[in-house]
Image (cartoon, grey):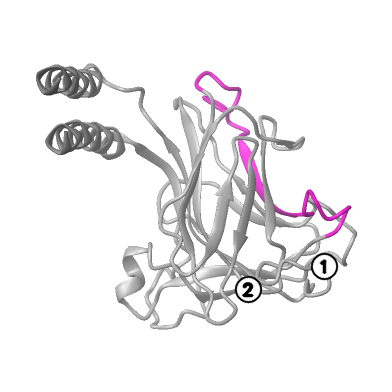
Amino acid sequence: MKSCKHIIGAAAVLAASLVTTQAQTISLWNFNSITPDALTTTGTLTPSIGSGAVSLVGGAASTFATGSPGDPASVSTDNSGMNLSTWAAQGTGNETRGLQVAVSTVGFANVSVSLDFRESGTVSRFWQLQASSDGVSFNNVSGGIASFGAVNNNTSTSFSSTGLYANTSSSGSQSFVQSVNYLFVSGSVYENNANFAFRWLAAFDPAAGGNYVSSFAGTTAAYSTSGTARFDMVTVASVPEPTSLTLGLLGMGAMIFRKRLVALR
């Protein structure tokens, strides 16, 4: 039984890797200085791949600080991230402050957005992903596939198909949750769209009666407007539909699995 699990698992991993390697980056921000200067406190809002614009929403302010280990530049001393602060007062401004990214997806289908995200202990525990097809009106996303990668020393990390992200950060040295990714429904209005944009916004705790709770303690009292939220590897990509080879590999794994089950009975 163990061996057949390994077989089908290997086929699934191979199929997934084929899709991943064929994904096309439309735009990417790593926030590192265009001319390396060995400083994490400097950086740029110019995309390192593609084109587009990163801006602040509401009264949030930003600086640069040490970036994510998911950035290939993490091996150097020039790995920067975009560090946001100055949040709304407790009980006010739900989903009004954060980061906005605008990218043309003309010529691309199956759009996804992703980022590496780090919270201090006193910033909001909850965040909402919103998207826009006209660059003006934004709505909470729905129906897509939400996922994330390495959580490092964070705990209780979750990300829903409606774009609500929650995370409990460390009390000491905070770290990034890597590859927080949302794949929009195939055929959505965000494909082949010159005005596509998305926002990542501080949100009330759904259970806290119209208040923010802090990322670490999870309390309204510990929330602070001076907490920080840090972004790196902000990406808009086009993810291809599964190829016939991918589907064939998955089918092969399932067929082998069934045959081995029959043999073991």
Seen as rendered, the residue at the extreme front is 265
Query: In the image, what residue type sits under mark 2?
Result: Ser
Q: Is residue 160 above or below residue 39?
A: above
The correct choice, above or below, for 10 with respect to 228 in the image is above
* Rendered image quadrant of residue 99: bottom right
| Above or below: residue 109 compared with residue 199 | above
- Circle 1: residue type: Thr
- Seen at 50% across and 28% down, the residue is 106
Which residue, given by chain and number where applicable, does mark 1 sit on?
220
- Give x and y (percent) for residue 72: 32, 64
Residue 216 x/y as whole percent: 65, 71
- Which residues lie in the magenta part? 186-211
Image-based side of 222 in relation to 113, left or right = right
Give the residue pinned by disc 2: 120
Residue 248 found in image quarter? top left
Residue at (12%, 23%) from the top-left corner? 264
Q: Residues within 10 Å of mark 2 (few under 14, many from 20)?
A: many
Image-based side of 94 in relation to 77, left or right: right
How many badges with numbers are in the image? Answer: 2
